[in-house]
Image: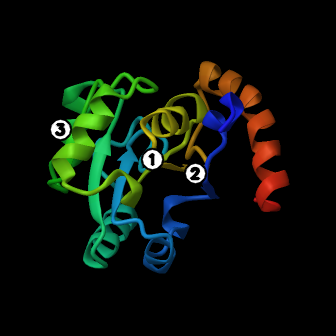
């Protein structure tokens, strides 16, 4: 694997809501470690919307273990997870892997059966790849009012062009 491959997601979806249990089963994914902000909810949503909670419930009911990881503070993660009850890691320091590795161990699922879902290449994808697990990238829910996020998205385009060449259009 080349250095550049650390920035290329294994899969891309417009939204987590498009990821079906059949896809996870076909790809032997038994644990999803989900980023929160701009992946499952906007920064301003303290709790998951019903459609996200339903998706998480459906995914878990299909036999997939769910955990949450975030670079955000403990209070944000605790509040969001208060209606869900999953294993969590806050202030995770992605793309560093220490907190992700600990969370994977807590789930009891093998690395090769685990994937990270997130909306950013330079944090979520890179963290997953550095930890040796699969990375699923989704489109950011909302980049309005986030100039630094828009700036990073500009640089992510290069890696998404590579993804598109390898996997077809996204």
Rendered view: 100 above or below 169: above
**Residue 169 higher or lower than 69, as above or below:** below
- Looking at the rendering, in which quadrant would you find the C terminus? bottom right
Q: Position of residue 8 (x, y in %)?
A: 66, 42
Residue shown at 45% from the left, 47% from the top:
133
Q: Position of residue 149 (x, y in %)?
A: 61, 26
Q: CA distance from mark 2 to mark 3?
A: 23 Å
- As helix, strand or loop, the secondary structure at mark 1 comes to loop
User: Residue 78, which numbered label?
Assistant: 3
Upstream in sequence: badge 2 or badge 3 = 3
Label ID, residue 133: 1
Name the image quarter holding the N terminus: top right
Residue 77 picture location, percent across and down: 24, 36
Where on the picture, by quarter, is residue 51?
bottom left
Q: Residue 29 at what x, y percent from top left?
A: 41, 65
- Residue 15, numbered label: none
Separation (CA) of disc 2 from disc 1: 16 Å
The answer to whether the residues at label 2 and label 3 have Cβ atoms under 8 Å apart is: no
Structural crowding at the residue carrying mark 1, measured as other residues with C-alpha within 10 Å and reported as few (<14), some (14–19) or many (≥20): some
Labels 3 and 1: the sequence-earlier one? 3
The residue mark sitting in front, 2 or 3, is 2
């Amino acid at each position: 694997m080349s250095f550049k491959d650390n920035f290329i997601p294994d899969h891309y979806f417009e939204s987590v809501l498009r990821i079906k249990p059949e896809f996870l089963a076909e790809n032997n994914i038994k644990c999803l470690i989900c980023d929160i902000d701009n992946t499952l909810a906007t920064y301003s949503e303290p709790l998951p919307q019903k459609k996200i909670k339903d998706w998480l419930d459906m995914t878990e009911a299909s036999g997939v273990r769910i955990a949450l990881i975030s670079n955000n503070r403990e209070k944000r993660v605790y509040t969001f997870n208060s209606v869900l009850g999953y294993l969590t890691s806050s202030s995770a320091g992605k793309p560093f892997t220490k907190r992700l590795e600990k969370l994977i161990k807590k789930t009891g699922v093998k690395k090769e059966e685990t994937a990270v879902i997130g909306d950013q290449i330079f944090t979520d994808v890179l963290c997953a790849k550095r930890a040796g697990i699969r990375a699923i990238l989704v489109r950011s829910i909302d980049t309005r009012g986030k100039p630094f996020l828009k700036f990073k998205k500009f640089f992510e385009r290069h890696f998404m062009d590579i993804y598109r060449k390898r996997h077809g259009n996204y």
